[in-house]
Amino acid sequence: MSTVNLVYFSWVRERIGKGEETLELPADVVTIADLLAYLKTLGAEYEAALEHENVIRAAIDREHVAHGEPVAGAREIALFPPMTGG
């Protein structure tokens, strides 16, 4: 297991009900996609926030990454909805 600080933004934060948390990730959480699937098992609020996981954007240590990116060694993972232009 590895410990990582998760930060949530915008409606992801609103639906989960917290801005950040520190979690111990199971050994089978290897990629961002695995992380999203794992988080959805933590409760209805996570499931609601990550229901359409394909639109969730991720950053590892403040660098945008694809869902296939490994999470090993990450200190911080941020999850947020798509950016909107204006």
Image (cartoon, grey):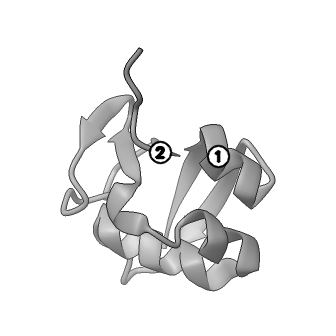
Residue 59 is drawn in which quadrant? top left
Q: Which mark is residue 81?
A: 2
Q: Amino acid at mark 1?
A: Trp
Q: Quadrant of the C terminus?
A: top left
Left or right placement of residue 77 versus residue 6 in this view? left
Q: Residues within 10 Å of mark 2 (few under 14, many from 20)?
A: many
Q: Which residue is mark 1?
A: 11
Q: Residue at x 50, y 79 (%)?
A: 38
Q: Residue furthest right?
A: 17
Q: Amino acid at mark 2?
A: Pro
Q: Residues within 10 Å of mark 1 (few under 14, many from 20)?
A: few
Left or right placement of residue 55 versus residue 64 in this view? right
Q: Are marks 2 and 1 in contact (CB under 8 Å)?
A: yes
Q: Secondary structure at mark 1?
A: helix
Q: Residue at x 61, y 63 (%)?
A: 49
| Near-viewer residue (53 or 63) | 53
| Near-viewer residue (68 or 45) | 45
Q: Compared with residue 32, is residue 44 higher up or lower down, i.e. above or below?
A: below
Q: Residue at x 41, y 66 (%)?
A: 53
Q: Position of residue 19 (x, y in %)?
A: 72, 42
Q: Position of residue 41 (x, y in %)?
A: 60, 85
Q: Position of residue 4 (x, y in %)?
A: 53, 53
